[in-house]
Structure formats: structure tokens, C-alpha cells
Amino acid sequence: MAAKTIIVTGASRGKHPQIPLQPMLTAHNVVVVARSLEPLQKLRDQYSKQVEVVAGDLADMSLPQKAVDIAIKSFGQLDGMVLNHGILGQTGKIATTDVANWQEAFNINFMSLVAFTTAAIPALRESKGNVVFTSSGAAVKKYRGWAIYAASKAAMNNFAQSLGCEEPDITSLAIQPGMVDTDMQVELRDVHGAFLDAEMHSKFTGAHKDGLLLKPEQPGHVMAKVVLDAPKELTGRFLAWNGEELKAFQE
């Protein structure tokens, strides 16, 4: 496979980033977009010819165009994106949530995806590239106290579906990574317990206690492989990382 250039967002969050970059860097180029430059400095130092870093707030709608421009300027092309960033946002019943919190979460979890996609479409049309969105089971299930996050992920799924319909040269997939041992799970257990439904909070604390959380690299490796070689016939779909449709990428 010829070297490809991939934009990856949200890769620096937490001690164990969900999208593993080192395997991708064995033969490809990566533009990493994150809030902080420091966690990725070592990676850039190690792979100086293959890594570019764009640091900034992902609620800044000018950031996506900067990332696309750097990808093309540094590596001559853009072949794919893994849009992996997101926040949990305010938890609690809809009646007690604040509209400003809805707006903040949608700006980061959804509107920024629109900005990345529209900025990248011309380059991805040319390369016949791929977009992988990190979704959630919350997008298709009803969870009390988690409406903001769930609604933003549902919007993401529909956006991926629409992109698949409108752009025949671009393959888009929304992938459900399952319950992964990331900073968001820590937030759910330790910060949001007072605002989540008791049954929901018990689900997350129980999964951690019983060792049921996935290691980040489990779904992450699948998503990293998919963005390099996504099956065209699956465009627009919402799929589980360990589902039969993605079996070829799970090895």
C-alpha cells in the first residue's frame, strides 16, 4: 500500500489514546489535532518526517481547515480522517440541563465534525478517501441522564449516513467502539455519579470493577485499519468495531 496521509483528532487525550498512531506510522503520515501540543511532542520528535501536530480548541471552527492545509502542504495529499474527539457534556435529566451546555457539546461533538468534513471534501474526493467517525451505542439507545451526549452522537450517525449518500468518492463510517477504558469512563464513574440515573451509574462502575472495559487499542486498531482501507460497500453505515462487517480489520 502506498503511503497515505491521515488526520486524527482526539488522539492525545488520556494516558492511553484510543487511536494508536505508531502502527499507522510504520508506512503512513499523520496530522494529529489536539488541544495540547505537549503530549504529542515526543511522537513528532520520533517521526519528524511523518507527523504534523495542530494544537487548538476543537470548538474553534477554523482548526479543521488548518489541519487540512497542513496535511496537503506537508504531505501533498489527504487520504482519510479519524474524527475521534468529543466531550461527555452535562449529564442529568433534560428538565435540569442548560441550553448553553447543549450548545457547547454540539459545537465539539458535532459542528466540528461538519467543519472537518467540509474542509476535507475536495481533497478526499481527489484521493477517494475515507472518514471514520467515533460514535457510541448511546446514539441508538435511550439512556436516562445522558441526552446531550447521546443526541450529539445520533446527529453524527446521520451525518455519516448523509455523507455516504452525497459523496460517492468518499467512504464514511460511524464506528461504535464499545465501553473503553478512557478518561470519559473515569468521568462517568467519579464526576457524574450524582447526576446520572442510579442504574446507569451502576453500569459504568460495575464494568470497571469487573474488568469489562475494553483496552483502547482494541477498537482503536480496527478504526486505524479501516481509515486506511475502508470497504466502499459499507459507506454511510453505523457499525460496531467488533461486528462481522469489520471482521477483516480485527486481526
Image (cartoon, rainbow, N blue to C red):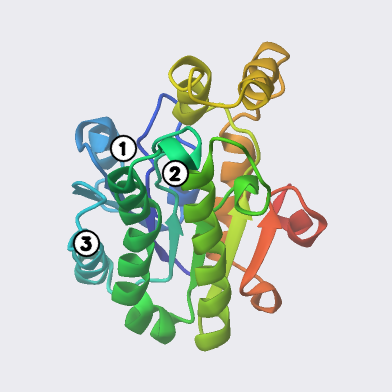
Q: In the image, is residue 133 above or below residue 179?
A: below
Q: Which residue is mark 2?
A: 21
On the rendered structure, is 28 left or right of 93? left
Mark before the other along the chain sequence, 3 or 2: 2
- In the rendered structure, which amino acid carries the disc numbered 2? Leu
Question: Is any atom of residue 19 visible in this view?
Answer: no
- Mark 3–mark 2 contact, CB under 8 Å? no
Residue 131 appears at what percent x and percent y?
49, 67
Q: Which residue is mark 3?
A: 61
Residue at 65% x, 77% y: name it: 232
Mark before the other along the chain sequence, 1 or 2: 2
Label 3: state its secondary structure: loop
Q: Mark 1, residues whose alpha carbon is within 10 Å: few (<14), some, or many (≥20)?
A: some
Q: In the image, is residue 8 above or below residue 126?
A: above
Count of numbered tags: 3
Q: Which residue is mark 1?
A: 43
- What is the C-alpha distance between the residues marked 1 and 2? 9 Å
- Mark 1–mark 3 contact, CB under 8 Å? no
For residue 187, what is the image quadrant?
top left
Q: In the image, is residue 105 above or below residue 91?
A: below
Residue 234 appears at what percent x and percent y?
69, 72
User: Disc 3 or disc 2, which is closer to the eye?
Assistant: 3
